[in-house]
């Protein structure tokens, strides 16, 4: 109905329909009986579209990716996940022949020349995804050679270079980080927090790092950066094992006026401990599920952390945990918004993580096909997202899968 207020000398209305005799109208109008919209839960997903109950939840995304054919199908799905969300390809990379079949070169670095040049070469190599089938011994040798080169040239190494090295290592995923950093016993916090002057004076002294009074804003930025790197569980574990948590606790409680610093230190501590707590929650049904769920919600809010979290879930030890079966009758619960005291069995927790992997691993396929105009597979990814949006449980899991990107998908 439209209501217009004005002065009209004349108005004509056209009414369409049939005239109903007044005798046909009941004396008392009965309100219509409410009809319920059919619940999407009453229409379960086909088994092949239900990653929460698949032994390999990433198989749906892998099937879509492999359907693109060479050169895409020649690289692993994790390769494109790192490429699209973590390492971020340059514009000129797309012109490389056979792209994305392009892997990092881990051959020995010649460190006899200018330090700036060979360190830049390391950075250039590691911004490209490492081959998923690379020999662990090759990775260890590469990491040891870089460690020796940096340790032997501290006076020549720029602080920003060392920071970027750890960043690129973190973005390659936990398996690469574990191998390349196996001999780095006191290095990560040193590379991330020390200033050039104190780097030279104290070397790789871990305990000194968080005690040293660097400029306030610099320290806050460093802690925020380390937090993102700790979306890689191998980095988080090394920091935990090196005693970072007591040092962070000192920052939290000894800076009463430094709210920003306290918050950054607490966020980093939560990120580090969250991995350990998640492993425990996936092994023991009596460990509360709410804290891990809140931690997962936080780690999936930025693009890089979300990608590193997904990579970790499909590599050891989580890949072994998620291979455990989920019975068909186990429902995918809507855990978000989380209700206080809401708990879940181990199977329900596994179903949630499997669904998160299943949905999340389709995202790089969507991004790639959208960028390259591969419309046939792009339409399939969009159809999948729409189907999952209609199903209870999956709709809530989708909100964990980097919500800002899904806003673009919905558009």
Image: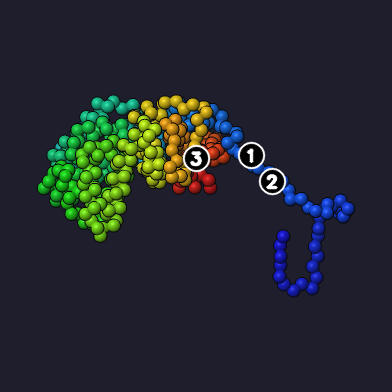
Image quarter (top left, top right, bottom left or bottom right) of the N terminus = bottom right
How packed mark 2 is, by other alpha carbons closer than 10 Å (few <14, some 14-19, many 20 or more), is few
Q: Position of residue 7 (x, y in %)?
A: 74, 74
Find numbered disc 3 in the image and state the secondary structure of the residue it sits on: loop
Confirm whether residue 48 shows in the render. no
Find numbered disc 2 in the image and state the secondary structure of the residue it sits on: loop
Residue at mark 3: 334
Q: Position of residue 125 (x, y in %)?
A: 29, 37
Residue at mark 2: 34
For the point 24% across and 58% down, the residue is: 256
Looking at marks 2 and 3 on the same chain, the residue that comes earlier in the sequence is marked by 2
Quarter where residue 375 is shown: top right
For the point 56% across and 32% down, the residue is: 45
Q: Nearer the viewer, residue 172 or 244?
A: 244
**Residues at discs 2 and 3 in contact (Cβ within 8 Å):** no
Q: Nearer the viewer, residue 240 or 131?
A: 240
């Amino acid at each position: 109905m439209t209501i217009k207020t004005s002065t009209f000398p004349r108005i004509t209305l056209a009414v369409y329909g049939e005239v109903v005799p007044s005798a046909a109208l009941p004396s008392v109008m009965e309100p219509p009986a409410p009809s319920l919209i059919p619940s999407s839960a009453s229409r379960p997903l086909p088994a092949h579209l239900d990653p929460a109950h698949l032994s390999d939840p990433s198989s749906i995304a892998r099937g879509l990716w492999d359907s693109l054919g060479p050169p895409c199908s020649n690289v692993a799905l994790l390769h494109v996940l790192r490429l699209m969300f973590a390492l971020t390809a340059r514009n000129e990379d797309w012109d490389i022949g056979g792209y994305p079949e392009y892997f990092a070169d881990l051959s020995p670095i010649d460190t006899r020349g200018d330090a700036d040049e060979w360190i830049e070469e390391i950075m250039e190599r590691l911004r490209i995804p490492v081959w998923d089938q690379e020999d662990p011994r090759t990775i260890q040798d590469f990491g040891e050679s870089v460690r020796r080169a940096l340790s032997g040239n501290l006076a020549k190494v720029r602080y920003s270079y060392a920071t970027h090295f750890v960043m690129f290592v973190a973005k390659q995923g936990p398996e690469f980080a574990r191998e390349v950093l196996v001999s780095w016993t006191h290095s990560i916090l040193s590379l991330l927090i020390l200033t050039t002057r104190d780097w030279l004076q104290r070397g790789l002294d871990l305990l000194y790092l968080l005690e040293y009074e660097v400029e306030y804003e610099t320290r806050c930025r460093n802690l925020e950066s380390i937090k993102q790197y700790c979306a890689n569980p191998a980095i988080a574990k090394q920091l935990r094992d090196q005693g970072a948590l007591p040092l962070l606790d000192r920052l939290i409680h000894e800076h009463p006026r430094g709210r920003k610093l306290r918050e950054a230190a607490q966020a980093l501590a939560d990120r580090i401990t969250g991995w350990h707590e998640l492993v425990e929650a996936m092994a023991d049904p009596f460990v509360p599920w709410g804290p891990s769920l809140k931690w997962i919600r936080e780690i999936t809010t930025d693009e890089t952390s979300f990608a590193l979290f997904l990579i970790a879930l499909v590599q050891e030890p989580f890949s072994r945990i998620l291979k455990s079966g989920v019975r068909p009758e186990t429902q995918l619960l809507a855990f978000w918004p989380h209700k206080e005291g809401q708990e879940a069995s181990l199977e329900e927790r596994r179903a949630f993580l499997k669904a998160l992997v299943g949905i999340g691993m389709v995202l790089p396929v969507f991004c790639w096909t959208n960028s390259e105009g591969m419309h046939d597979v792009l339409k399939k990814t969009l159809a999948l997202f729409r189907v999952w949006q209609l199903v209870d449980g999956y709709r809530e899991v989708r909100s964990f899968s980097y919500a800002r990107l899904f806003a673009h998908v919905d558009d």
